[in-house]
Image: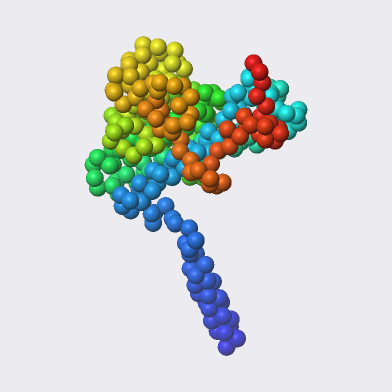
Amino acid sequence: MKINYRILGLILAVVGFSSCKDFLDLAPISQIGDNEFYSNTEEVEAGVIAIYDGLQQGVLREFALTEMRSDNTRTKSSEGEWAQFETLDVQATNGVVANYWSTWYNVIFRANTVLQHLDAVDDATLKAQFEGEAKFARALAHFKLVRLFGDIPLVDRVVYIEDEEYYSRKPSDQVYAFIIQDLEDAISKLPTRSGIAEGRATKGAAQSLLAKVHLTLGNYSEARTLLEAVMNSGDYALVPNYRDVFYDELNEEIIFAIQYIEDNAEESQDFSLEFTALGRASGLNYITDN
């Protein structure tokens, strides 16, 4: 009899553990799973808008990795991570570099997420536009990274933890070939400036970025052809006064510009602050007279 009780107890324990496991194995109610979203055109477009949100952070501290290493700027003090760029002694633990790296790969992730769910878009024109916008951003992110770091991981789809083959760096020439293909696809799918909301990627933006890629690689003939197409498109023109480029947002001289919401601390950039007395006092950036 005792044996029967023990067997019954063991069965109840196993059933109880299984039920408990099923009860605990729930999707987090505070998050939207990847397979639960992107089920229609509106949700996919929300993913496209999220790409532009990611771009805001990508360029926020880019001057630290570029201009801070030149003789155009200097830090107010010789301490901290910012000073490492000025002294050309950047440590592997530098947080500014780590943030820049992860931010651009986050943009790539967002772009790949959109590309993965394009089948949810019924309208063929919008589907092509979203694909063009995602590939433009993915190319831009890879271009930013390969120019600074050389060989980098090439991420052409949504990557999960178990996808270890994506952890290794790919030769820069392979990365550039991928960037060129993405931009050529974007050019064929993106509308011109008049056919899309201001602030979003256009055919002219993709042509201009591809021209910059070719200039980086020394392909001057290809770059010239692309830039002449942009100049002759009629969508862009030089403003009469150079200062108006900065005072009139999205003017006819602007081909592509990352947008921010004014007076929103969570969605803004403070680069212009660095040119003021207050910005200089912060110690981040000190403009020289060179």
Closer-to-camera residue (273/146):
273
* Coordinates of residue 286 in the picture (x, y in percent): 67, 27
231 sits to left or right of 5: left
The residue at the far right in this view is 78
* Coordinates of residue 200 in the picture (x, y in percent): 38, 37
The residue drawn where x is 44% and y is 55% is 33
Does the rendering let one see residue 51? yes
The residue drawn where x is 73% and y is 29% is 76
The residue drawn where x is 48% and y is 68% is 22
Determine whether 183 is above or below 2 in the image: above
> What is the number of callouts on the image?
0
Dividing the picture into quadrants, the one containing residue 270 is top right
* Coordinates of residue 166 in the picture (x, y in percent): 49, 36
The residue at the far front in this view is 241
Determine whether 13 is above or below 204 in the image: below
Applied colour scheme: rainbow
Closer-to-camera residue (223/260):
260
Dividing the picture into quadrants, the one containing residue 192 is top left
Closer-to-camera residue (169/3):
169
Q: Quadrant of the C terminus?
A: top right
The residue at the far bottom in this view is 1
The residue drawn where x is 33% and y is 21% is 230
* Coordinates of residue 172 in the picture (x, y in percent): 49, 22
Q: Quadrant of the N terminus?
A: bottom right
Does the rendering let one see residue 93? no
